[in-house]
Image (cartoon, rainbow, N blue to C red):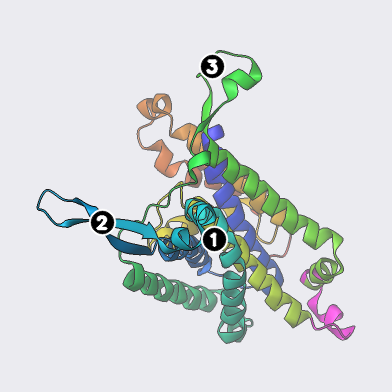
């Protein structure tokens, strides 16, 4: 169950953004996985920037070939001392400060520059254009950063294990969990809670929810609902980007990372119910945990390969029993 929390958290965050965009704008955004990937590469880019090194030749030490030893020191460490060393070590969490404005700008530009022209087009056209955009973005990343995964270490102080056995009073070492994965789960919980609180308790959020229910009536009241929906697209991009940033120590990012999560996240959205924010989050955690159970060796010995298809099997069963998903609303994608 613990192993499923971090993957379920990633599914939930991506599915939450997908549902936000679909619920506000009615757009099926196949480029959303690329936003997750872009967030991950914010962490990669900042780490590379902070790791730029100043090279000085040693005056006292030489190599086996008699040449001076090169002493490499990151510029930020040379300039800021211990603070610079801390910035390099904590480059992944620090990337959040970079990813928020960057992903907000990417989301707003994407919506204003492309997506708005497809609001009233059929969903098939929306899928085609956003899928094409996703391929363009991933090829740009591939050309810039290469095709190979780029490992991103978690901060040194956060690489250990949490021994839940000691916490719950059983033998030590029986239930251990990587600390960073626990942090990712807590981070996802904070992001999900913040988004729900923003929509539930702020005037902006209440107008957005009213617009999701009846866009025309809100517009007749003189409220610029399009502007608010554009910002919601930006918010969804930020959520996907932050999910990508914090996931980099768990899975080394490459240009194809977004596509790997996109299909599964769409399954999560459908299982949760199209347009349902609570459904997307609940389905994300549910399917992540079930996938973790299916990955256990004891289960795979009985059902080989079940971990690769369990999510789709569960989706089929749920959609047969509840065609609109776990919390789907009547009328969504039924016209």
Among the two numbered marks 3 and 2 on one chain, the one whose residue lies closer to the N terminus: 2
Q: Is residue 219 magenta?
A: yes
Circles 3 and 2 in contact, beta carbons < 8 Å: no
Task: Measure the alpha-carbon separation of dots 1 and 2.
Answer: 33 Å
Q: Secondary structure at mark 3?
A: loop
Circle 2 packing at 10 Å, graded few (<14), some (14-19), many (20+), is few
Measuring from the top left, give residue 1's x and y in whole percent. Answer: 56, 32
Q: Outermost residue toward the right?
A: 221
Among the two numbered marks 3 and 1 on one chain, the one whose residue lies closer to the N terminus: 1
Left or right of residue 169: residue 248: left
State whether residue 108 appears in this view.
Answer: yes
Is 107 or 32 nearer to us in this picture? Answer: 107
- What stretch of residues is rendered in magenta? 212-224
Circles 3 and 1 in contact, beta carbons < 8 Å: no
Is 99 or 227 nearer to us in this picture? Answer: 99
Q: Main secondary structure of the magenta part?
A: helix
Q: Secondary structure at mark 2?
A: strand
State whether residue 334 appears in this view.
Answer: no
From the image, tell me which residue sits under label 2. Answer: 58
Residue at (53% x, 41% y) in the render = 181
Task: Measure the alpha-carbon separation of dots 3 and 2.
Answer: 48 Å
Is 145 or 265 nearer to us in this picture? Answer: 145
Task: Measure the alpha-carbon separation of dots 3 and 1.
Answer: 35 Å
Is 158 or 83 nearer to us in this picture? Answer: 83
Mark 3 or mark 1, which is nearer to you?
1
Circle on res. 172: 3
Residue at (35% x, 72% y) in the render = 144
From the image, tell me which residue sits under label 1. Answer: 95
Measuring from the top left, give residue 297's x and y in whole percent. Answer: 39, 27
């Amino acid at each position: 169950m613990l192993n499923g929390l971090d993957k379920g958290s990633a599914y939930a965050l991506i599915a939450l953004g997908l549902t936000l965009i679909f619920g506000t704008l009615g757009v099926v955004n196949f480029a959303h996985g690329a936003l997750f990937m872009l967030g991950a590469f914010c962490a990669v880019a900042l780490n590379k920037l902070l790791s730029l090194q100043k090279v000085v030749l040693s005056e006292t030490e030489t190599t086996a070939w008699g040449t001076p030893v090169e002493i490499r020191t990151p510029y930020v460490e040379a300039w800021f001392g211990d603070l610079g060393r801390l910035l390099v070590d904590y480059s992944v969490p620090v990337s959040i400060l970079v990813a928020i404005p960057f992903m907000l700008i990417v989301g707003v530009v994407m919506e204003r520059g492309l997506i708005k022209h497809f609001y009233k087009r059929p969903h098939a056209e929306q899928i085609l254009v956003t899928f094409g955009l996703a391929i363009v973005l991933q090829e740009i990343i591939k050309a810039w950063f290469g095709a190979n995964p780029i490992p991103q270490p978690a901060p040194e102080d956060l690489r250990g294990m949490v021994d839940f056995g000691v916490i719950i009073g059983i033998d030590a070492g029986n239930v251990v969990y990587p600390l960073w994965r626990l942090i990712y789960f807590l981070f996802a919980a904070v992001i999900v809670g913040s988004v729900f609180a923003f929509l539930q308790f702020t005037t902006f959020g209440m107008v957005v929810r009213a617009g999701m229910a009846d866009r025309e009536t809100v517009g007749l009241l003189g409220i610029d609902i399009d502007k608010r929906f554009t910002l919601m697209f930006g918010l969804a991009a930020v959520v996907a980007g932050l999910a990508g940033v914090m996931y980099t120590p768990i899975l080394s990012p490459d240009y194809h990372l977004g596509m790997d999560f996109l299909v599964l996240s769409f399954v999560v959205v459908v299982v949760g119910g199209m347009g349902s924010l609570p459904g997307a989050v609940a389905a994300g955690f549910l399917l992540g945990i079930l996938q973790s159970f299916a990955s256990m060796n004891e289960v795979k010995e009985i059902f080989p390969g079940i971990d690769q298809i369990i999510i789709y099997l569960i989706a089929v069963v749920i959609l047969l029993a509840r065609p609109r998903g776990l919390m789907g609303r009547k009328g969504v994608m039924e016209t």
